[in-house]
Amino acid sequence: MRNARLFYIDGQWVEPEAEKLFAVRSPATEQQIEEISLGSARDVDRAVAAARRAFPGYAVASRVERVELLKSVLAEYHRRAADLAQAVTDEIGAPQTLARDAHVEFGAAQIQTAIAILEAYTFEEARGTTLICKEPIGVCGLITPWNWPINQIATKVLPALAVGCTMVLKPSELAPLSALVWTEIMHSAGVPAGVFNLVNGDGPNVGGAIAAHPDIDMVSFTGSTRAGIEVARAAAPTVKRVHQELGGKSPQILLDDADFAAAVTAGVMGTMLNSGQTCSAPTRMLVPHARIDEAAAIAKAVTEALVVGHPSGNAHLGPVVSRTQWEKVERLIESGIDEGATLVTGGTGHPDGLEQGHYVRPTVFANVTNDMTVARQEIFGPVLSILGYSDEDEAIRIANDTPYGLAAYVHSADLQKASQIARRLRAGQVNINSAPLDFTAPFGGYKQSGNGREWGDHAFGEFCETKAIIGGVPTA
């Protein structure tokens, strides 16, 4: 890519302060496909200074000006959709149809949603003679992961841009290609110089410098809980706002009256989507003890119908992102076998004929107990665990017995009962009966799944400060 070794600072593509190169490898072939520069704290300083200079002017841009800017971003995004899809396929191994119809489409939906919200968002509210104002928080550091690279950039950049913030983006060094295309889109769309900046790099150096920087007012991070803790630690001395969307181990409760064929199929597909690399995936399927064998049989048939293969073909699942990730998934599958779970299908080792590349055999375990490693740890691979329960209270107890709380799923023919159970689940988002995705619904977690919310108008609030002007509303 033309700008792969450069950073985008103050409206220009610039050389890094020091040359330190990183090989971007295809997870499908393990071959190098690009080389990027890894930044340093000095590069972060330059980007933050540009964002700080740009903030006073951009913060007072009118709603109309910002709406028009987002519309320009959307137009450029549509124009570069094919490039974005190819970048995602290259960098994380997403099959082409998934890259086009999910990764790219989710990003477009986030932009469209942000435009609609901005057009009607309430920035000021009178309460008696007091005026409550929502103002842009300032310069934002945005640190995004590799698993849904475009969507995660969009969920941070769009609300920040909409409310009047300036920003520095650090995408994952494992998936920087789509971020480079995104940056070209921002430039072509006419985003003012300094409002959006890109510095590539790794977590400890560039991510750490962003989190600790005294001139950054907020850091928004998506990634593992372990890394999120380090971001919060680095940010603490400057008392900046830390917004985090972290790990998950989401339960899917199937009540006895659920349509098991549909619900189990949905659980399998939700778990296997994106090769299992989705933080909100329903990886713990809870079913009545008497129906474990039935659920396992359905899950086995659905899973074994999935095609794993090179992302350029018609595969349902491509590889996982890296050798490190592949080894982690393999260790956790082995732990399920060693700890006595019933291996329904899949297992360790590469799928037949796919020895090169980071391909994983889609795996289903049954008779899992909630103390097993596969039920406790976020695997981030195509691995489903089926657990049994005796009654609804036990199902809820098991579902909540996790350090995470990002998402949960409930299936029942009785919507009222499903809704009652949803209210008792300690998760930031609960989906009932495979309801369609809602891009205006707040997304974020309880417990170690993070704090704050993305998506919709709740995301706008995360990037705002609240000011009360007492006596600011004239009396009648």
Image (cartoon, rainbow, N blue to C red):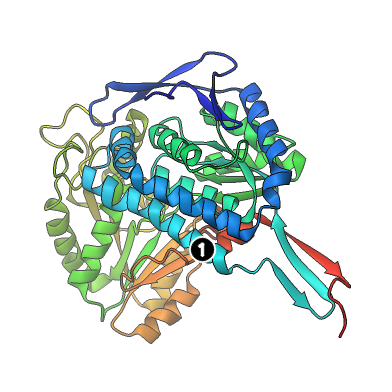
Percent x, y of residue 181: 41, 36
Q: Between 191 and 86, which is closer to the camera in this rendering? A: 191
Percent x, y of residue 361: 20, 42
| Picture layout, residue 364 above or below residue 146 | below
Count of numbered marks = 1
User: SS for tag 1?
Assistant: helix
Which residue: 32% across, 39% down?
Answer: 88
Residue 418, image quadrant: bottom left
Tag 1 residue: 456
Quadrant for the C terminus in the image = bottom right
Percent x, y of residue 399: 42, 65
Pointer 1: residues within 10 angstroms few (<14), some, or many (20+)? many
Which residue: 19% across, 48% down?
Answer: 316
At label 1, the amino acid type is Gly
Q: Between 282 and 127, which is closer to the camera in this rendering? A: 127
Which residue: 19% across, 26% down?
Answer: 356
| Picture layout, residue 394 above or below residue 166 | below
Q: Most extreme residue toward the top, as rendered? A: 19
Q: Between 65 and 4, which is closer to the camera in this rendering? A: 65
Whether residue 348 is visible = yes
Whether residue 377 is visible = no
| Picture layout, residue 55 above or below residue 290 | above
Q: Is residue 184 left or right of residue 128?
A: left
Residue 84, image quadrant: top left
Percent x, y of residue 280: 40, 56
Q: Is residue 4 left or right of residue 353?
A: right
Q: Between 240 and 430, which is closer to the camera in this rendering? A: 240
Quadrant for the N terminus in the image = top left
